[in-house]
Image (spheres, grey):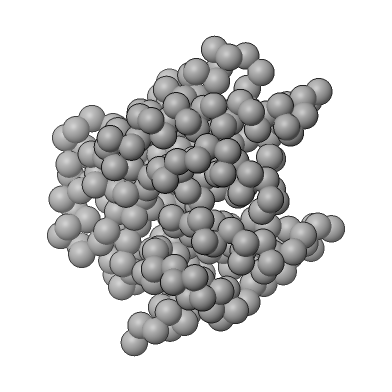
């Protein structure tokens, strides 16, 4: 297993360019984030789409060259899509956005693109929404496959809150190019069981310092136990830190990274 970090972990410092009409430059860039990850002796970085100052080829090539210089893999890119849209035209726009970021991942040499399903809109059932998501994922997978980019569907609440929902979507799509981004902190009811059920389908994984119980209480996670579960199915992919706790990531992420490196057998 390799250890990396999601740019999202430093969201309060990074510039946010999700709305091109209202860019919000920050005190950190993707380049300085990558340097920080290299300084922590991490193996890779997940570059979240919200923080790209540009998606033109020159900018992407600079990021790719910097990763090479720093000895980092770009383990994946990430898009904040929502396929649970009532209007087919809105779903089509979400599909187009995923295709755009598939191209970005391809140009960066990233093997995976993290994608979401979304929450069911008011008045709509999970089953209806899952049908929409399956169709969107099938279209996106057909686009991603020739580029060699795996779409990694995250268990991210909504209609992917439970392992059985995630697995139903993956099996219904039926493509080797749609796998799971296993977020080990996002299962609420029976996390260790659900992690074990999901990990055989995982292309990548997110790790958090804490999770929340169904009644909203914060709870730490047993990463020695989780890593043993991953090893049991020969998972060799990335554990990308997605830090969301209250402590400043400038101090918390390096400490968590050191612990993960130890648990995965790094000196």
Instruction: Tell me if I can see residue 121 in this picture.
Output: yes
Looking at the rendering, which quadrant does residue 34 occupy? bottom left
User: Image height check: is 98 above or below 154?
Assistant: above
In front here: 151 or 168? 168
Residue shown at the point (68%, 40%) measured from the top left: 159
Q: Residue furthest right?
A: 215
In front here: 157 or 257? 157
Instruction: Tell me if I can see residue 26 in this picture.
Output: no
In front here: 248 or 267? 267
User: Image height check: is 163 above or below 248?
Assistant: above
Instruction: Report the label total.
Output: 0
Residue shown at the point (25%, 61%) measured from the top left: 72
**With 71 as the anchor, is 44 left or right in this view?**
right
**With 30 as the anchor, is 80 left or right in this view?**
right
Question: Residue 78, how many percent across, how many down?
Answer: 43, 43
Residue shown at the point (68%, 57%) measured from the top left: 187
Looking at the rendering, which quadrant does residue 122 occupy? top right
Question: Residue 29, how many percent across, how many down?
Answer: 33, 47
**With 93 as the anchor, is 39 left or right in this view?**
left
Question: Residue 177, how many percent across, how many down?
Answer: 40, 43
In front here: 47 or 91? 91
Question: Residue 7, how many percent across, how many down?
Answer: 41, 52
**With 141 as the anchor, is 174 left or right in this view?**
right
Residue shown at the point (63%, 22%) measured from the top left: 85
Quadrant the N terminus occupies: bottom left
């Amino acid at each position: 297993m390799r250890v990396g970090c999601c740019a999202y972990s430093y969201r309060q410092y990074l510039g946010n360019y999700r709305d091109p009409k209202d860019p919000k430059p920050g005190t950190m860039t993707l380049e300085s984030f990558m340097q920080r990850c290299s300084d922590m002796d991490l193996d890779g970085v997940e570059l979240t789409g919200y923080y790209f100052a540009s998606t033109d080829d020159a900018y992407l090539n600079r990021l790719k060259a910097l990763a090479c210089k720093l000895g980092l893999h770009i383990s994946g890119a990430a898009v904040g899509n929502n396929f649970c849209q009532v209007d087919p035209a809105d779903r089509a726009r979400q599909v187009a956005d995923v295709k755009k970021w598939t191209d970005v991942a391809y140009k960066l040499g990233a093997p995976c693109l993290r994608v979401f399903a979304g929450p069911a809109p008011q008045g709509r059932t999970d089953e209806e929404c899952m049908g929409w998501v399956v169709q969107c994922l099938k279209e996106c997978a057909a686009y991603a496959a020739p580029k060699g980019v795996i779409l990694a569907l995250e268990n991210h609440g909504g209609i992917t809150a439970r392992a059985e929902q995630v697995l139903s979507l993956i099996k219904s799509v039926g493509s080797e190019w749609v796998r799971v981004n296993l977020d080990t902190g996002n299962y609420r009811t029976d996390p260790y069981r659900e992690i074990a059920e999901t990990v055989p389908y995982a292309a990548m994984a997110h790790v958090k310092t804490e999770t929340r119980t169904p009644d909203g209480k914060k709870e730490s996670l047993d990463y020695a136990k989780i890593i043993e579960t991953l090893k049991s199915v020969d998972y060799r992919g990335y554990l990308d830190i997605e830090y969301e706790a209250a402590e400043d990531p400038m101090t918390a992420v390096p400490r968590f990274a050191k612990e993960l490196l130890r648990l995965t057998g790094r000196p």
